[in-house]
Amino acid sequence: MNDESVDENSGGEIDPALVAILEQLWRAQCETPGRAWSLAKLSKQAGVPMSGLRRHLTGLVDNGLVVTTFAEDGTGSASLSEDGRAFCVEVFGEAAP
């Protein structure tokens, strides 16, 4: 993960918003395999404002864990990449959180 996902003021702990996003992407993978969730749904389910969601997704995409698509109207969707699915299995286990 990049340095932005680690909060320097929290003793090196991972940002809780990032964890929430990954949890929801894992939930999406388990509940609807092969289908991406809209950014609006992901934002609501993770409890993360859209601006924060987009910032974290950029880091997750850069690290190869997430795939995103964006439309001209500003809407988009996100899903875990193959590496992201493997990472979530290691972190969250086989079942969705």
Image (cartoon, rainbow, N blue to C red):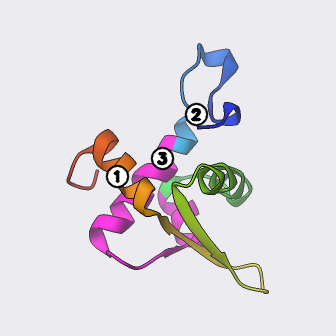
Task: Identify the amino acid type marked 1.
Answer: Ala
In the rendered structure, the answer to whether residue 70 lies left or right of residue 95 reads right
Q: Residue at x 72, y 52 (%)?
A: 55
Neighbor class of circle 3 (other Cα within 10 Å; few <14, some 14-19, many 20+) is: some
| 9 sits left or right of 22 in the view | right
Measure the C-alpha gap from mark 2 to mark 1: 20 Å
Q: Kindly report the secondary structure that dominates the magenta region of the rendered protein.
A: helix
Above or below residue 68? Residue 53 is: above
Query: Which label belongs to residue 35?
Result: none
Q: Which mark is residue 20?
A: 3
Q: Nearer the viewer, mark 1 or mark 3?
A: 1
**Residue 11: quarter of image:** top right
Left or right, 90 with respect to 58, comes to: left
Q: Position of residue 16 (x, y in %)?
A: 53, 36
Which image quarter: residue 5?
A: top right
Q: Is residue 23 magenta?
A: yes
- Residue drawn where x is 48% and y is 42% of the image: 19
Q: Amino acid at mark 3?
A: Ala
What secondary structure is marked by label 2? loop
> Which residue shows up at 69% across the image and 58% down it?
54
Question: Could you say whether the residue bearing mark 1 is in a helix, strand or loop?
Answer: helix
Can you identify the residue that label 1 sits on? 86
